[in-house]
Amino acid sequence: MKKILTKENFYRFLDWLIKMIGYSLILIITSLLFKHTLYIDKDWFGLWSFLAAIIIYLLNKTVKPILFKLTIPITGITLGLFYPFINLIILKLVSIILGDHFEIYGIIYAVCASILISILNIIMDNFLDKLLRKEHKHES
């Protein structure tokens, strides 16, 4: 019988959970900085941002690779400047899924918010990778 709850699976889940909480915080910070562009329902602010983070994660794993492959020519012609628009499309899809609880208005500031989210994601991913790698070394 295969063991489901192993240390490796626990660390994967912990990594995923920390990333979802981090993405939620990034969305909250971005919505506070760009109040007229990115709106998250204030009644259950944390819940809606966490749910949006999960949906973004799922769309990044499924839809984003397809969008990236479809837009390679445009991204190449613009020397990579089109890539934030792919993130904007993902955010718009989340807006459609969550309806009134998560909305994006306008395009210029939404692209700026998308770039900020991308930068913060890169920083958070690098930080978590270093933290988890350091933790894994201590166990070995």
Image: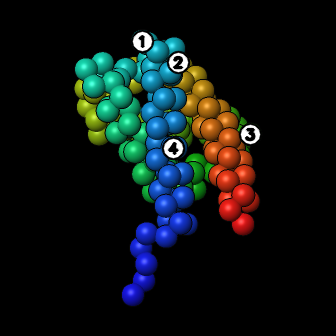
For residue 40, side relative to residue 100 (left or right): right
Task: Indicate which label's residue lies in the foreground, 2 or 4.
Answer: 4
Residue bearing the label numbered 1: 36
In the rendered view, tell whether residue 52 sits above or below residue 113: below
For residue 49, side relative to residue 19 (left or right): left
- Cβ atoms at labels 4 and 1 below 8 Å apart: no
- Cβ atoms at labels 2 and 4 below 8 Å apart: no
Task: Indicate which label's residue lies in the foreground, 4 or 3.
Answer: 4
For residue 15, side relative to residue 47 (left or right): right
**Amino acid type, callout 3:** Leu
Secondary-structure class at tag 1: loop
- Cβ atoms at labels 2 and 1 below 8 Å apart: yes
Residue drawn at the location 54% of the way across and 58% of the way down: 11
Q: Earlier in the sequence, mark 4 or mark 3?
A: 4
Can residue 26 be seen here? The reply is yes
Can residue 82 be seen here? The reply is no
In the rendered view, tell whether residue 29 sits above or below residue 24: above
The Cα atoms of the two marked residues, 4 and 3, are separated by 33 Å
Question: Which label belongs to residue 79?
Answer: 3
Residue bearing the label numbered 4: 18
The Cα atoms of the two marked residues, 2 and 4, are separated by 27 Å
**Amino acid type, callout 1:** His
Residue drawn at the location 63% of the way across and 38% of the way down: 124
Q: Earlier in the sequence, mark 2 or mark 4?
A: 4
